[in-house]
Amino acid sequence: MNEKLLKIIDERQLVSVMNKTKWRELCGEFEEIHELGVNVRYKMITSDQLYGFSPVWWDQLLRETVAIEWIDFDPKKRERRSQLVLDKETDISDVILNIFKKHNIPYSLENNCFRVWGYLNQNVQPVFV
């Protein structure tokens, strides 16, 4: 881990929730089912910017996990039809939750999404499911 990240972790008093093995298992499983098109959004500890909701390249995301504060998984897959017809929604929560369960990935429910926490601080106290 580089000096910049260590400084941010220290200044914000962050505590790691996920380790490298858990991140590798999580990203590897979702890489295998990439055709499902799971949409995620995530926040890095290095900025306040949110990335997503969109599909991601899991192998590339794995390289960034050392700085991911949290990642939200959308339990619905949305397929665009047209401007005049509502998007088709498919519930994929079982697929996501089975992966979490298989690898004992801790998560919470945040705004109708499954959130995997990379880091917590004293001001954040999620209720893990």
Image (spheres, rainbow, N blue to C red):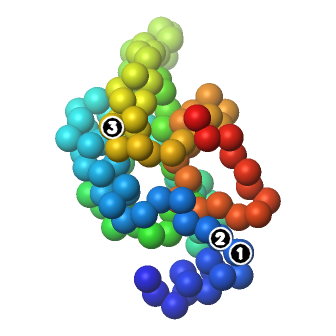
Within 10 Å of disc 3 (Cα), the crowding (few <14, some 14-19, many 20+) is few
Within 10 Å of disc 1 (Cα), the crowding (few <14, some 14-19, many 20+) is few
**Badge 1 vs badge 2, beta-carbon distance below 8 Å:** yes
Element under disc 1: loop
125 on left or right of 107: right
Q: Position of residue 93 (x, y in %)?
A: 44, 24
Within 10 Å of disc 2 (Cα), the crowding (few <14, some 14-19, many 20+) is some
Residue at image point 33% right, 61% down: 21
Element under disc 3: helix
Which of the numbered marks, if any, corresponds to residue 12? 1
Q: Position of residue 37 (x, y in %)?
A: 32, 33
Which of the numbered marks, if any, corresponds to residue 129? none
Residue 48 occupies quadrant: bottom right
Which of the numbered marks, if any, corresponds to residue 102? 3
Q: Quadrant of the N terminus?
A: bottom left
Residue at image point 51% right, 90% down: 3
- The residue that mark 2 highlights is 14
Q: Amino acid at mark 2?
A: Leu
Work out whether residue 76 or residue 12 is closer to the camera in this orientation and state it.
Answer: 12
Q: CA distance from mark 1 to mark 2?
A: 5 Å
Residue at image point 50% right, 32% down: 74
